[in-house]
Amino acid sequence: MWLFDPLYLIMLLPALALGIYAQWRVQSTFAQYSRVNASSGTTAERLARRLLDGAGLGNVKIEQVKGTLTDHYDPRTRTLRLSNPESRSLAALGVAAHEVGHAIQHARAYRPLELRTAIVPMANFGSQLALPLFFLGLFFQMPPLVTAGIVAYSLAVLFTLVTLPVEFNASQRAIALLRDGGFVTSGQELGAVKRVLGAAALTYVAAAATAVLTLLYLLSRRR
């Protein structure tokens, strides 16, 4: 029902357009710089290991994970997973350094990361049950259900908003680590890494915009 509501489509159109652009941008940018090797000649795995050890995080493991752009840091097991650990490309080095940035955030008790981790269960609940609760409340004319749906979805929105400083900070840390450690040896290489990480960050901005506009739509339907 709500997917075909003209008001919803109109409100969400800017975020949808941004999301499509963000996906194209991250795929095209990553593909471009996956073909350009860093002059330092190091691999993503060696880079990650040196950065982790340099930050006093020798207890963080590095594993390979299947897929493309599936790289991530798991704070529960203190494991950094790389999709292409043997790559020497600027794209792979940038992504590896970004995930090291998350590991450092975890070790340093970075507040936004701690907040995001704390609200994960509630955000998962909100994203799964919010809309069914909301529209059941509308259908059966039960305001408490409608309100419960909005509150639940607000938790999912909060998660997307808190994610923004976490991701931007990890990228800032990555750029500083690569520059200060001499792993990228020219302004051109550093610029390429910034473009890769900037494109990835845009997907989180699009997700947050979609969530916020959807929440505004729910509030407008509630009235």
Image: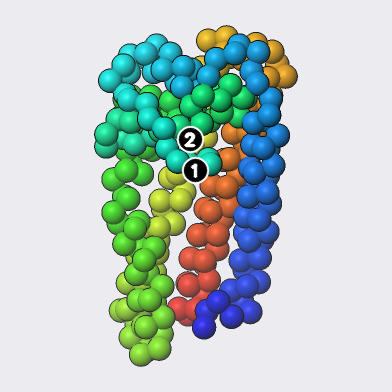
Q: Along the horizontal axis of the image, is 202 left or right of 84?
A: right
Please tell me which of labels 1 and 2 falls first in the chain: 1
Label number found at residue 67: 1
Q: Position of residue 189 (x, y in %)?
A: 68, 19
The reply to whether the C-beta atoms of the residues labelled 1 and 2 are less than 8 Å apart is yes
How packed mark 2 is, by other alpha carbons closer than 10 Å (few <14, some 14-19, many 20 or more), is: many
Q: Considering the numbered disc 2 on the image, is that residue within a helix, a strand or a loop?
A: loop
Q: Residue at x 53, y 47 (%)?
A: 204
Badge 2 amino acid: Ser
Label number found at residue 36: none
Q: Position of residue 71 (x, y in %)?
A: 46, 36
Badge 1 amino acid: Gly
Q: Position of residue 134 (x, y in %)?
A: 39, 77
C-alpha span from label 1 to label 2:
6 Å
> Which residue is disc 2 drawn over?
83
Q: Residue at x 56, y 55 (%)?
A: 209
